[in-house]
Amino acid sequence: ADKYENDIQLDAMRKRFGYSYSDVIVVSPSKLPGYETKIKSFFEEHLHTDDEVRYILDGSGYFDVRSKHDDWIRIHMKKGDMITLPAGLYHRFTCDERNYIKAMRLFVGDPVWTAYNRSKELETCASRVNYLKTFTGSANSSSSSSLSSRSSGKRGAEALATPTIGDYGEQGQPKLSKNKTTNSRNKKYSSIVLDIEGTTTPISFVKDILFPYAAEKVEPFLTAHWTTDETKTDVQLLIEQANQDAQDPSLLSAMPGFRAVPENKKDLLKWCVENVLWQIRHNRKTGSLKQLQGHIWRAGYASGELKGQIYDDVVPSIEKWISQGSKIFIYSSGSRQAQRLIFGFSDKGDLRKYISGYFDTNIGPKIQESSYRQILETVGGDDDVLFLTDLLPEAKAAQSAGMDTVLMLRPGNTPLPVDHGFETASTFSELFQGQRHTQ
C-alpha cells in the first residue's frame, strides 16, 4: 500500500478489470469537509448501481454487509486490504476508533458516487435483481436477502473469491472463441451490451438535437458558471487539449479554424466558446469537449429543455431480457455522464434502474477488439454476451473479442455493404420473434 503509485500488481489488476479511473479519499474529521454529515450518510444502508472498489492505503474502518439471512456481517478493513462490493449489494461504512482511513477508489470510466438508501422500490431495480441472481441464485429478495462481498484482505467474512486462473487463459485473457458464427436466435444471454446512437436512440437525436443544443448554449452556460470549480476544471481541460493540438500540424491542416489559447485571461471565455464550436464543427470526440457537453446537457435535461429519445421497442425488450436473467450494459462513444442523462431523462421516463453499467471510450475505442475484451472481463461471460450496434466496424471488433453481435437497421442508420455476414434486426422486438436476417 505504501508504493501504490508504482505498484505493478495494482496496475495489472486495473488493466484486467478495466478500472480506468482512480482517486484517493481520506475520511477523518480534519481531512474530509462536512465529516459528521458524510460519515452519517456512509452509515445509512444503501446500494450503488456500479461496483464499489476500495484499496486501503492507510488507517482502518468497517464495511458492514448482510448475511444470507439478512444479518449484518462486519468486515474490518485495514491497510493493504482491497474490497469489491458488487453493484446492487446493500451495505454501509463507518470508521473505527481511529476515525481515520485513506483509500483508493477505483472505477470503470467516469465515477458515479450516487447512493440509493434501502427501500422496497429498489428491490426491482436492475442492479439489485442482477445481484440477487448472481450471488444468491434468486431474483426474489424476500426469499433471500444475502449480501456478500469480494475481498482480497485476509479478514473478510463470507467473502466470495475473485476470478482465478481457471477462469482465464495463460496470458490472463478470458477464454474466448474468435470469429464464431452468430446464431443466437432463442439464446439467453448473461449480458446484453447496447450501443446508443442508431440502436436505442435515433441518430438524429444526437446529431440534430444534442450537438446543436450544446453549440447554442455553450456561451450562456460558461458565462453563468464561469466561477464554479466544475467549470474551471472544464476550461483547464480545453486549454490542455488546445496546447496539445497546437503541436500537431497534420491535425491543424485537416481542421482549419483552430486558435491558440490567448495570453490575456480576459479573452479566455470567448476563446473557450470558439474552441468548443471548432471541435463540434469538426466532429471531434475529445475528453475535454465531451465533459463540457455533458455538463451543458445536464443543465438542459434538468430544466426540461431536453429529453432523451428512446425507440418504442427498447423498454419492453429490456424488461424481457432482465426477466430472463440478463444484465443490461451501455457502450457508447459519449461519456458515461451523457449516457446516464439520456436514459435518466428520457421520453420513456427514468430508465437507469434497468442499466447495470455504462462504458465509454475510456475503456478503449469502439472499433478495437481489445475494448470489447475489457468489457467481457468486467461483465463476465464469454460466449453468452450479446452486442447490438448499427456500425459494421464495431460489430467486427465485438465478434472478434467473442461476443454475439447483431446489426440494427434503424431509420437513418448508415447503409450496410452487401454480404457483411452479420445478423440484422430492425427492432429489438425482432430478437424475440426470430425475424433476424443474415447477409
Image: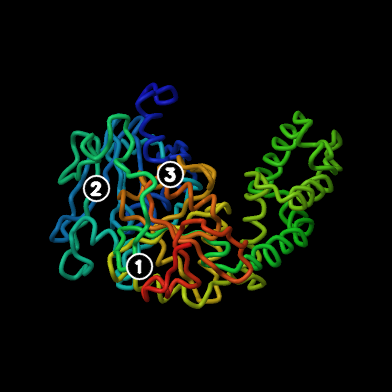
Q: Which residue is mark 2?
A: 149
Q: CA distance from mark 3 to mark 1?
A: 21 Å
Asked which secondary structure carries label 2, the reply is loop
Type of the residue with mark 1 = Cys
Q: Which mark is residue 107?
A: 3
Q: Position of residue 31 (x, y in %)?
A: 46, 37
Q: Count the marks: how many?
A: 3
Residue at disc 3, secondary structure: strand
On the image, which quarter does residue 114 sit in?
Answer: bottom left
Relative to 189, residue 309 above or below: below
Q: Are marks 2 and 1 in contact (CB under 8 Å)?
A: no
User: What's under tag 3, amino acid-wise?
Assistant: Phe
- The earlier-in-sequence mark between 2 and 3 is 3
Given residues 29 and 378, the one toward you in this image is 378
Identify which residue, 232 or 310, lies in the foreground: 310
For mark 2, does the 10 Å Cα neighbourhood hold few (<14), some (14 to 19), or many (20 or more) residues? many
The residue located at (71%, 41%) in the rendering is 238
